[in-house]
Image (cartoon, rainbow, N blue to C red):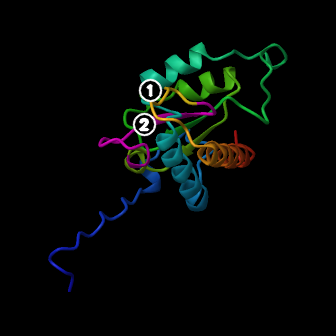
């Protein structure tokens, strides 16, 4: 029996493998999924997150294009990481994003649930895609703590590492 005053958290939604889009590759496993969601949560608190297809596409198109030598960016140190939900219907909504990410040298990874992605990015609605940037997207009025910046840099590095590890498992 539970207390009348205590609130039980909502159960995690289960995702059936057949409901995922067929091109969801690389798909994060459970352990990687948790790490990704933690990084998205930290990105939300650090204001380094773009939500939704329209905002992500706009950011990707404004980012430096394919030439690594001219942009100063490397695959080891990308400017952003794209996280896509694999349970999107219709799938045409996000089908162009992996190609756009590859054109702009942005690593991407799929997670199994758009509801969990929305919850991690602090929105009330399920989110189909988020772009986690290395730097702040918008400036905050209060001064940023030095420890907060170091913590974000560490979380971002961990996210890049997870995305690159998942990308190695890509099958064509």
Q: Is residue 73 magenta?
A: no
Residue span colored magenta:
119-135
Asked which secondary structure carries label 1, the reply is helix
Instruction: Compare residues 61 and 149 and report the one nearer the observer.
Output: 149
> What is the residue that sits farthest to the right in this orientation?
69
- In the picture, the disc for residue 128 is 2
User: Is 121 located above or below residue 1 in the figure?
Assistant: above
- Magenta-colored stretch includes residue 121: yes
Question: Quarter-wise, where is residue 34 in the image?
Answer: bottom right
* Res 7 → quadrant: bottom left
Q: Give residue 27's position: percent from left, percent from top.
A: 59, 48
Between the residue at mark 2 and the residue at mark 1, the CA separation in whole angstroms equals 7 Å
Mark 2 in CB contact with mark 1 (< 8 angstroms): yes
**Which quadrant is the C terminus positioned in?**
top right
Image location (x, y in percent) of residue 135? 61, 30
Residue drawn 53% across the image and 34% down it: 48
Where does residue 25 sit, x and y in percent of width and height?
61, 42
Marking on residue 53: 1
Q: State the count of labels.
A: 2
Camera-nearest residue between 34 and 128: 34
Position of 1 with respect to 38 (left or right) is: left
């Amino acid at each position: 029996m539970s207390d009348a005053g205590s609130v039980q958290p909502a159960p995690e939604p289960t995702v059936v493998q057949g409901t995922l889009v067929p091109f969801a590759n690389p798909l994060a496993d459970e352990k990687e999924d948790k790490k990704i969601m933690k990084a998205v949560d930290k990105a939300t608190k650090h204001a380094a997150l773009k939500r939704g297809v329209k905002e992500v596409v706009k950011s990707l198109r404004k980012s430096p294009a394919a030439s690594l030598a001219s942009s100063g960016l490397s695959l080891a140190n990308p400017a952003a990481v794209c996280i896509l939900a694999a349970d999107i219907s219709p799938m045409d909504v996000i089908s162009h994003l992996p190609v756009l990410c590859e054109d702009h040298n942005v690593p991407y990874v799929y997670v199994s649930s758009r509801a969990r992605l929305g919850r991690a990015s602090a929105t009330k609605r399920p989110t189909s895609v988020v772009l986690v940037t290395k730097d702040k997207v918008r400036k905050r009025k209060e001064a940023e703590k030095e420890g907060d910046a170091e913590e974000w840099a560490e979380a971002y590095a961990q996210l890049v590492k997870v995305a690159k590890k998942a990308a190695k498992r890509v099958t064509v």
